[in-house]
Image (cartoon, helix red, strand yellow):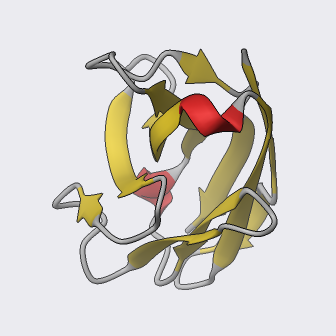
Amino acid sequence: QVQLEESGGGLVQAGGSLRLSCVASGRTSDAAAAGWLRQAAGKEREFVAGITWTGIDTAYADTAKGRFTISKDNAKKTVYLQMNSLKPEDTAEYYCAVRTFGTNEYNYWGQGTQVTVSS
């Protein structure tokens, strides 16, 4: 089992920045990758950014490229999502997730943190 706890969400004006954090605990030795996904009201959950558990490789959705940066502090077992130039359409519940070895999908999820961007 891997436990994930997100923090850092809040209300910000368009053009502002937020940094989300996700602290992992439990059997993190099973983790292969981590990611941030989001779900806006009335919409399906979508991938935002991902990172290998080693922190070496990253991937971004087109909507995040150039504005968001995913990173990982291996010592702290913490994954970050730095979000700059936020837009109202970035408003959503943001979830941290982990994929363990031997799986093809994220199989551990945090509770989510709300990000609201006002225009």
Is 22 or 74 nearer to us in this picture?
A: 74
Residue beneath the point at 24% across and 73% down: 65
Res. 101 visible in picture: yes
Quarter of the image where the N terminus is located: top right
Is 13 or 108 nearer to us in this picture?
A: 108
Q: Is residue 88 above or below residue 22?
A: below
Res. 40 visible in picture: no
Quarter of the image where the C terminus is located: bottom right
Image coordinates of residue 41 in percent, x first then y, are 51, 24
Q: Residue 42 is drawn in which quadrant?
A: top left
Residue beneath the point at 67% across and 67% down: 74
Image coordinates of residue 26 in percent, x first then y, are 82, 28
Residue beneath the point at 61% across and 83% down: 16
Left or right: 33 in relation to 104: right
Across the whole image, how many numbered discs are drawn on residues? 0
Image coordinates of residue 94 in percent, x first then y, are 59, 41
Image coordinates of residue 91 in percent, x first then y, are 54, 48
Q: Is residue 99 above or below residue 102?
A: below
Q: Is residue 101 above or below residue 75?
A: above
Is 60 or 72 nearer to us in this picture?
A: 72
Q: Residue furthest left?
A: 62
Residue beneath the point at 74% across and 40% down: 113
Q: Residue 62 is drawn in which quadrant?
A: bottom left
Is 115 or 101 nearer to us in this picture?
A: 101
Q: Residue furthest front?
A: 29
